[in-house]
Image: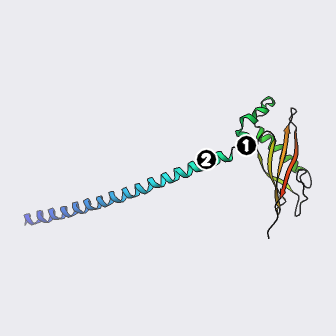
Amino acid sequence: MKNKIFIYLFAFVSLVCLYLFVSSGNLAKSTNTTIGKLKNEIITLQDSVQGAQLKALEMQYFSLENNDDALAYYDHLNIKNPNEYIADKLLETNEKKGDNPLVPYEGMENSFKINKIKILNHKWIIADFSDGKYWGEILIKYELKDDLSVDFTLMDHLLYTRSN
């Protein structure tokens, strides 16, 4: 009787060990497959991040804040952030009642106001304007003077037509 119990116990333990061995092998295969997929995904994501960084650098090429030669023109003025200072001065032109004086169009729905500004270098700005329904872009020449005043001169403009 004692021998049969040991035989059944041995058979049961053997089956449990066999089950654990097979399931750990399957778990290892599954884990390795998952790790391989995740490594491929990491490589893809790293490539995407690198592509996005290159695109961002390319987009920043024409910008005052990344152009040391253009920023050198403002060293003697002791302005902490010339980009922000010039943008603020340009946005101050929106405060006048009615259309912005730099926008050569009359607003059709509301007054045309400058929305988005990109300072290209120490002389030029490109800006987006809109009245809420119609929009366009303007190219502005500017000069930051020693007394910290800024003169803006419209160089070119474009009003998009609605296709509706």
> For the point 82% across and 59% down, which residue is it?
135
> For the point 38% across and 58% down, which residue is it?
33
Q: From the viewer's perspective, tell me whether residue 94 is left or right of residue 30.
A: right
Q: Quadrant of the C terminus?
A: bottom right
Q: Where in the figure is residue 115, as x and y percent of width and height?
A: 80, 53
* Residue closest to the far front: 156
Q: Quadrant of the N terminus?
A: bottom left
Q: From the viewer's perspective, tell me whether residue 62 is left or right of residue 48.
A: right
* Number of the label disc, if any, that sits on residue 163: none
> For the point 86% across and 46% down, which residue is it?
92
- Callouts 2 and 1 close, C-beta under 8 Å: no
* Number of the label disc, if any, that sits on residue 54: 2
- Report the amino acid beneath label 1: Ser
* Residue closest to the far top: 76
Q: Where in the figure is residue 114, as x and y percent of width and height?
A: 83, 52
- Report the amino acid beneath label 2: Leu
Q: Where in the figure is residue 125, as x and y percent of width and height?
A: 80, 46
The residues tagged by marks 2 and 1 sit, at their Cα atoms, a distance apart of 15 Å
Quarter where residue 68 is shown: top right
Q: Secondary structure at mark 1?
A: loop
Q: Check disc 2: other Cα within 10 Å, few if <14, some if 14-19, many if 20+.
A: few
Q: From the viewer's perspective, tell me whether residue 28 is left or right of residue 50.
A: left
Which residue is labeled 1 in the image? Answer: 63
Q: Check disc 1: other Cα within 10 Å, few if <14, some if 14-19, many if 20+.
A: some
When the figure is inspected, residue 56 is found, relative to residue 15, above or below; the finding is: above
Q: From the viewer's perspective, tell me whether residue 65 is left or right of residue 36.
A: right
Q: Secondary structure at mark 2?
A: helix
Q: Where in the figure is residue 75, as x and y percent of width and height?
A: 77, 30
Label 2 or label 1, whichever comes before in sequence order:
2
When the figure is inspected, residue 57 is found, relative to residue 24, above or below; the finding is: above
